[in-house]
Amino acid sequence: MQRERHQDNPAAPGPALMVMALLPFGFGYFLSYLYRATNAVVAPDLVRDVGLTASELGLLTAAYLLSFSLFQIPLGILLDRYGPRRVQSALVALGALGALLFALGRTSVELLLARAIIGVAFSGGLMASFKAVVIWVPEQRRPLANALVMSTGAIGLLMATAPLEAAVQAIGWRAVFQALAAITLLVSAIILFVVPERPGPARQSRLAAELAEVWSIARDRVFIAMAPLLAITSGAHIAIQTLWAGPWFRDIAGLDRTSVANRLFVMAAAFFAGILITGWVADFMSRRGVSLLKVVLAFIVLFMTTQLGIILEIKSLELVLWSLFGMTGQAAVIAFPWLASYYGAERSGRANSGINLPMFLFAFLFQYAIGAVIDLYPTSGTGGYAPEGYRMAFGLLLALQVLALIWYLMHTRVLAEAEHRVLEGYKGNAQRS
């Protein structure tokens, strides 16, 4: 596939400009992960106040993921056409409205619609950040820059555990969402008025032509080889960590509500550490000529191994396994700067969003399906879910990931050829710098 590379290696800006260009997007991604994971903590309140079943809770929580995924294709086009600053500030402002509607919702339908609005609003949390990285950061340092941006999302996940539980206990979940609405509106203003612009070549192509380019990316052999593994593993992590890990700690580990929130905090801290560690390892290896795709594959295999241990309920390793689950669950995102390099900076938004779409579509399906499988088994006298339901749901999810891994390995030659092109592109950009 032909790629335009004239913008792939921007000159590195100074530290102050880098902070202004990237940190506001980090605030947006912080909120994206905070909203994504809130239901893992407030689920008991929603069940109590609205009377939700396990499948209904899964559907309500996953509505964020469904609307998030469905907006990825238009998002990629918007980011490439109008730039991340204007697109992300508008979307985050929409998120403030969604949070307010969620705070005011009284029925499951009202809450579902509000959460779907929040999903659309934060569909650009990571993709806008990655587009900003492509615009501002030299090519070979992008894995590390992406990891630093993603670490802000990990902080959002941290806040959606014990700190969120404390806030809910103090003022109630509705008041918490009202406060989040105000904070979200402030972040929208920061992105709009603080982030600088870096002019690029004017885009004159029609929408139909840009949609055709999206389709050409989706049909590319490299995309077809990588998408299932990246999307299914990442989707599984999102589905579990942002909802079903909490009930698992309650029903399998036997923890009370405060202890569940504390365990989720440990997982979130592991996620934060994992983002930084995997980003640093990817940066270290890529600068020494090691394929970024090999680094991604190694972390994904470790992630799948931790799930096997969780399914087997190895009690002595429970905390270690869940911590490793949190650390390695988003290893697929390491591949995003590689995709931007392969498809070119001009199409990076559409390429990354093209992977993000199935990633969050699978997260939606998995989050709902886990609840549906759990509902097949009887609940306990105290309202907890059956251990057999978790084992069946998590086991089916792991089986899908194994199939995706086999598919990926079947395309080793295609990926090796693509990796050679990317490395040649690095060399060419280095010579031009």
Image: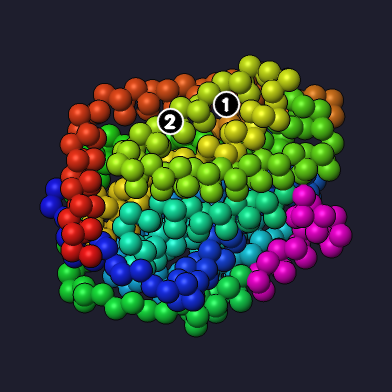
Q: In the shown orientation, is residue 409 left or right of residue 322?
A: left
Q: Using the image as rendered, state which of residue 320 and residue 233 is in the foreground.
A: 320
Q: Position of residue 151 (x, y in %)?
A: 56, 54
Q: Position of residue 207 (x, y in %)?
A: 22, 66
Which residue has dot 1 on it?
306
* Residue at image location 53% in from the left, 23% down from the top: 305
The stretch drawn in magenta includes residue 168: yes
Which is more N-terminal, label 2 or label 1? 2
Q: Position of residue 162 (x, y in %)?
A: 77, 50
Mark 1 and mark 2 in contact? Answer it, CB < 8 Å. Answer: no
Rendered view: 400 above or below 79: above
Crowd band around label 2 with a 10 angstrom C-alpha radius: few (<14), some (14–19), many (20+): few
Instruction: Select label 1 or label 2 by which is in front.
Output: 2
* Residue at image location 60% in from the left, 33% down from the top: 324
* Residue at image location 47% in from the left, 68% down from the top: 22
Q: Secondary structure at mark 1?
A: helix
Q: In the shown orientation, is residue 217 left or right of residue 18?
A: left
Q: Position of residue 379 (x, y in %)?
A: 75, 25
Helix, strand or loop: magenta stretch: helix
* Residue at image location 27% in from the left, 34% down from the top: 225
Q: Which residues are magenta?
A: 162-183
Which residue has dot 2 on it?
298
Q: Using the image as rendered, state which of residue 306 and residue 298 is in the foreground.
A: 298
- Amino acid tagged 1: Thr
- Amino acid tagged 2: Ala
Q: Where does the C terminus fall, quadrant-wise?
A: bottom left
- Taking the view exactly as shown, the residue that stands out farthest to the bottom is 193
